[in-house]
């Protein structure tokens, strides 16, 4: 106990801050290796049910967002570009709106931004199953076997997302 009394306040703060960062990053990796939670939710565009199992064998980037969220809005053009470049038989971006707004409102948002990937409406269960997060945007990278590989908190630049995605695509290996 006497040893701690001789540590400067700056070093104590640094130690506490380091523990905080460790806890933060541990939480992000807590999902790594776990199976993607199942979901079957309505498409924003036409109301048809989109089932997680229909994406079996694909690499997925699942992005939870809201229409009112500035970092989410900033991320959308990058997600559109990723879908344009890699979307198809082996990769898909899936948007999951956490809005309290109506599906009609979110549909206008999607059409205005020309979002080219499936967008579904979240419910409490899917948010809980993906870790009951409170911050958005939050994205999950899922491999072809349905395992969550990475969790990204906040806005993530394409320069980080793209290499992670390419690493999982079959033609990149």
Image: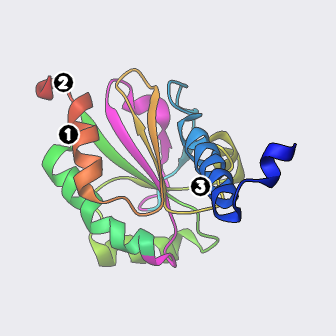
Task: Give the color scheme: rainbow, by chain, secondary structure or one colour.
Answer: rainbow
Residue plotted at (25% across, 56% down): 158
Category of crowding for the residue at label 2, using alpha-carbon neighbours closer than 10 angstroms: few (below 14), some (14–19), many (at least 20): few
Task: Give the magenta-colored segment's residue range.
Answer: 45-70
Q: Nearer the viewer, mark 2 or mark 1?
A: 2
Badge 2 or badge 1: first in the primary sequence:
1
Q: Is residue 161 left or right of residue 104?
A: left
Q: Examine the structure image and report whether residue 55 is included in the region drawn in magenta.
A: yes
As helix, strand or loop, the secondary structure at mark 3 comes to loop
Residue topped by disc 2: 170
Q: In this view, does 113 lie to the left or right of 98?
A: left
Badge 2 or badge 3: first in the primary sequence:
3
Quarter containing the N terminus: top right
Check residue 88 in the rendering and tell me which mark sits there, or answer none: 1
> Residue 62 at what x, y percent from top left?
43, 47
> Residue 126 at what x, y percent from top left?
63, 45
Residue topped by disc 3: 122
Residue plotted at (41% across, 77% down): 108
Mark 3 and mark 2 in contact (Cβ < 8 Å)?
no
Spatial separation of the CA atoms under disc 2 and disc 3: 30 Å
Tell me the quarter of the picture where residue 22 sits. top right
Q: Nearer the viewer, mark 2 or mark 3?
A: 2
Q: Examine the structure image and report whether residue 158 is included in the region drawn in magenta.
A: no
Q: Is residue 97 left or right of residue 164?
A: right
Check residue 116 in the rendering and tell me which mark sits there, or answer none: none
Category of crowding for the residue at label 1, using alpha-carbon neighbours closer than 10 angstroms: few (below 14), some (14–19), many (at least 20): few
Q: Which of 71 and 86 is in front in this view?
A: 71
Spatial separation of the CA atoms under disc 1 and disc 3: 23 Å
């Amino acid at each position: 106990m006497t040893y701690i009394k001789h540590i400067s306040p700056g070093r104590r703060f640094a130690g506490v801050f380091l523990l905080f960062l460790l806890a933060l990053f541990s939480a992000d990796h807590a999902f790594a290796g776990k199976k993607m939670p199942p979901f079957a939710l309505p498409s924003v565009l036409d109301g048809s049910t989109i089932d997680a199992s229909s994406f079996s064998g694909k690499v997925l980037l699942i992005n939870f967002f809201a229409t009112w969220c500035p970092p989410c809005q900033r991320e959308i053009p990058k997600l559109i570009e990723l879908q344009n470049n890699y979307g198809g038989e082996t990769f898909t971006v899936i948007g999951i709106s956490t809005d309290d707004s109506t599906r009609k409102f979110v549909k206008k948002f999607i059409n205005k931004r020309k979002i080219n990937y499936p967008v579904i409406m979240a419910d409490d269960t899917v948010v809980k199953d993906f870790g009951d997060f409170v911050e958005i945007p939050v994205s999950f990278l899922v491999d072809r076997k349905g395992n969550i590989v990475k969790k990204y908190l906040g806005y993530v630049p394409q320069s980080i997302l793209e290499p992670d995605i390419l690493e999982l695509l079959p033609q990149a290996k």
